[in-house]
Image: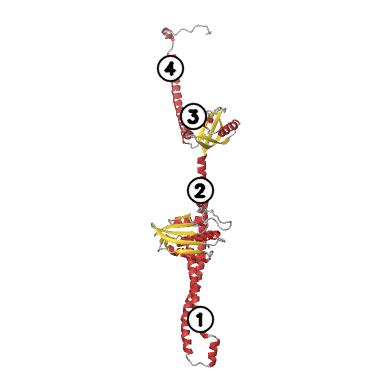
Amino acid sequence: MTPHSPPAPPLLPEDLDGVSEDTWLDVIHKMEEVYSKLVTDEVELEEKNAQLEQSQQFIFSLLSSMSDVLIACNQDGLIEESNAALCKLVGRSEQALRGTPVPDLLADAQSVQRWQLAMYHAAAHEVAVVELNLRDAQGLPVPVDMSCTPRHNSSGREVGRVLVGRPLGEIKRAYHQLREAHDALKLAQQQLLHSEKMASLGRLVAGVAHELNNPISFVLGNVHVLQRYGARLGRYLEAVQQLDLPGPVQALRQELRIDALVKDLPSLMEGTLEGAQRTADIVDGLKRFSSASQGGVTQVELNAVVERAIHWVQKGTAPNFEIQWTRGPDCHVSGNAGQLLQVMMNLIQNASDAASAHGAGAATAPQLRISLSQHNHQAQVRFADNGAGVAPAHMAHIFEPFFTTKSVGKGTGLGLSISYGLVEQHGGHLSCANLPDGGAEFTLALPLR
């Protein structure tokens, strides 16, 4: 047929009379094949549509659940896609953002310059990471750490940019939580090391105290026997003195100063007893101190613990430190006597260091006032020194581990933090405040038994 030839006339019914039955069967068979093919193609098309819908739903769920903001823009910087995090941050819907230039979301000119620089690097197939200030729903700048990468279509041609970023507030918050966890881990490690040292020291002290108890018992027992023997010898010599002794015996008695010796025997015995008893008290104190490494909870009388702590500090590192102790009513708390003794000694020693450093060359001697009272089912022990007090900038950090205002080599910064932890383990609280007239006051509050 030529382009200008008329169309063929339609077949008339009389023209179909010569068509055979086989021809009709072939036509019907071909029509069935075409229909079957159409049905198969339709089923495959529906499956592909379902897969495509699932993929789209999966991508949408990912974009919706992302906490990071996401922007997909074209080569001109016009937004084509965004996610729920960005919409929430800027206070606009996804439909309102579509077609908006990215610079319209930025809060300042510096961010616009950084955005342009990121676009330049992305054009060179480089990944650019910049900090941009986005304008939030209230118009306030929100710093976002944004990465910009090139975006390509299915044929590999570059069609735009993809920006993914996280508000720096979340990063800083995560970093702060990480730092807190790290500090807590360091504190736990230091406390574990300290506890192990205290446990080793406790075992050593307990062993030494046990070994010293035997000879001290011998001394005390023998001195008591000698006292009885001395009394008997005194009575005997007094009886002998009533006799008419020969001259040489009386001269020997005067030469050996028997009368003075017998007179001195009671005081010598008493001095020996006092020294042995003091040694026994020291051993008993060592045994009590060693109990700090043990976790036994008993009924503890706080007055006795405070007095023992005062005794140990004054006998040890601060013999000239003036302590005014006001004994309170009997106060019984549940806890570990050794650990509470450790807390009391640490507070007294810190007060001595602070008052001595402030009072060097001053007319007022270093002093500490300790008082015990009961209030609202709590026992409160107050330690008020006449030092320089705690600087306001240091008050919030005074119980932190490794924080110290002492010079290098004078302190580790662990005493107060460990004491704070021990008091909390006893269900109490340790606080600090500056006194109006100068100096610092630490208050130890423990629940009464």
Number of residues whose C-alpha sits closer than 10 Å to that of mark 3, classed few (under 14), some (14–19) or many (20 or more): many
Is residue 203 shown above or below 27? below
Q: How many marks?
A: 4
Contact check, label 1 and label 4, Cβ < 8 Å? no
Real-space CA distance between mark 4 and mark 2, rounded to the nearest whole angstrom: 81 Å
Contact check, label 4 and label 2, Cβ < 8 Å? no
Contact check, label 3 and label 4, Cβ < 8 Å? no
Is there any visible trace of residue 267 in the rendered image?
yes
- Image coordinates of residue 250 in percent, x first then y, are 53, 90
Could you tell me the amino acid type at mark 2? Glu
Could you tell me the amino acid type at mark 1? Asp
Q: Nearer the viewer, mark 3 or mark 4?
A: 3
Question: Is label 1 in a helix, a strand or a loop?
Answer: helix
Could you tell me the amino acid type at mark 3? Leu
Q: Nearer the viewer, mark 4 or mark 2?
A: 2
The residue where tag 2 is placed is 180
Real-space CA distance between mark 3 and mark 4, rounded to the nearest whole angstrom: 56 Å
Q: Nearer the viewer, mark 1 or mark 3?
A: 1
Question: Is label 3 in a helix, a strand or a loop?
Answer: helix
Could you tell me the amino acid type at mark 4? Ile
Real-space CA distance between mark 2 and mark 1, rounded to the nearest whole angstrom: 68 Å
The residue where tag 1 is placed is 264
Tell me where residue 375 sits by quadrant: bottom left
Q: Mark 3 or 4 closer to N-term? A: 4
Q: Mark 4 or 2 closer to N-term? A: 4
Question: Is label 2 in a helix, a strand or a loop?
Answer: helix
Q: Mark 1 or 4 closer to N-term? A: 4
Measuring 51% from the left and 67% from the top, which residue is drawn there? 207
| Quadrant assignment for the C terminus | bottom left
The residue where tag 3 is placed is 97
Q: Nearer the viewer, mark 2 or mark 1?
A: 1
Q: Mark 3 or 2 closer to N-term? A: 3
